[in-house]
Image (spheres, helix red, strand yellow):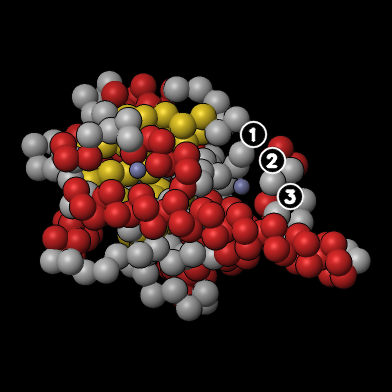
Amino acid sequence: MCGTCGCSTTPDSLERLPKEEATETVSVLSNLLSKNNHAAAHNREHLDRAGVLCINLMSSPGAGKTALLEATIDALAGRYRIGVIEGDLETENDAERIRAKGVPAVQISTGTACHLDAHMVHRALHDLTLGDLDILFIENVGNLVCPASFDLGHHLNVTLLSTTEGDDKPAKYPVMFRSTDLMLLTKGDLLAVLDDFQPERAEAALRNLANAAPCLTVSSRDADSLAPWLNWLDARVADLKQGAPLNPVMQPDGALMHAAE
Ligand SMILES: Nc1nc2c(ncn2[C@@H]2O[C@H](COP(=O)(O)OP(=O)(O)OP(=O)(O)O)[C@@H](O)[C@H]2O)c(=O)[nH]1
Ligand SMILES: [Zn+2]
Ligand SMILES: [Zn+2]
Ligand SMILES: [Zn+2]
């Protein structure tokens, strides 16, 4: 999956490398992650100081992140001031869809990189007026692996799994699903016509990863279905206001694929 960004190093390939090269690769990787973590902590300071809850949305391409954001912005109009950072390889399309809702959106075009990192998000944060926001959503690049390995300075991870993708995704892509604070089963309106996606099986696959995060079924085409998701957001905004320490769970093993960057 990662041929486009020079991601070529897996734990297996590390074992096959001569010892010195393997050590060098691991040290390049720790250096990369430590620089990223430093920038992420700085980003979180910006957000905490401004009292802005920041959520990182992750999923495979097309699972419905932008559609969920559009529906969420409509549902929360007048209640929270929302901002969005959009990550894609190319195009401003998603940011334009969000701006059409009257919400500030900064597009990050990653070019060849298949995930956002804290430095890219830092630049985007400085293009927003954080004092004007209550919730900042980051739509990560559609990819079910490496986005979970790079702390952006956000507070919580939300992973979307759409009903058209198969209910065994948490078992097949454990790196991302282990790190999530909430799993949203999206395109719930299609459950009526899909005979093989069972929300209970998707939730069981999440529990098999020892992740107790809530699992909710939503549809961006049905405003009523969003209520539990909006309640979850309300509770997290309250957590932040009460000074609860909100830090995302990271999965550094996915970054092994980027040691060559
Ligand atoms: N039936 C149905 N279709 C949906 C729903 N949400 C999104 N879609 C459709 O799924 C397609 C992809 O939706 P997007 O919101 O663009 O997905 P995304 O995750 O933002 O995609 P990338 O940014 O490319 O990763 C579009 O054709 C949407 O209309 C939903 O709740 N129900
Ligand atoms: Zn999108
Ligand atoms: Zn990547
Ligand atoms: Zn700064």
Q: Disc 1 marks which amino acid? A: Thr
Q: Nearer the viewer, residue 69 or 194?
A: 69
Disc 1 crowd rating (10 Å Cα; few below 14, some 14-19, many 20+) is some
Q: In the image, what residue occupies the spot 42% across and 41% down?
A: 121
Q: Residue at x 26, y 37 (%)?
A: 83
The answer to whether mark 1 is within 8 Å of ligand 3 is no
In 3D space, how far apart are the residues under numbered discs 3 and 2 (Cα atoms)? 9 Å
Residue 179 sits above or below residue 211 on the image: above
Left or right placement of residue 246 versus residue 153 in this view: left
Given residues 46 and 81, the one toward you in this image is 46
Q: Name the front one of labels 3 and 2.
A: 3
Task: Give the image quarter of residue 15.
Answer: bottom right
Contact check, label 3 and label 1, Cβ < 8 Å: no
User: Is 130 left, or right, of 212 in this rendering?
Assistant: left
Q: Is residue 40 left or right of residue 175?
A: left
Q: Which residue is mark 3?
A: 260
Could you tell which of marks 3 and 1 lies nearer the N-terminus?
1
Direction from residue 50 to residue 22 in the image, left or right: right
Q: Residue furthest left?
A: 78
Q: Residues within 10 Å of mark 2 (few under 14, many from 20)?
A: some
| Quarter of the image where one finds residue 203 | bottom left
Mark carried by residue 132: none
Q: Residue at x 63, y 62 (%)?
A: 30
Closer to the N terminus: mark 3 or mark 2?
Answer: 2
Task: Tell me where residue 168 appears, x and y as whole percent.
Answer: 57, 62
Instruction: List x then y, in percent, for residue 146.
Output: 59, 53
Query: Which amino acid type corresponds to the residue marked 3 in the rendered image?
Result: Ala
Secondary structure under tag 3 reads loop
* Disc 1: which residue: 112
**Which of the two discs, 2 and 1, labels the residue nearer the N terminus?**
2
Q: Is mark 2 within 8 Å of ligand 3?
A: yes
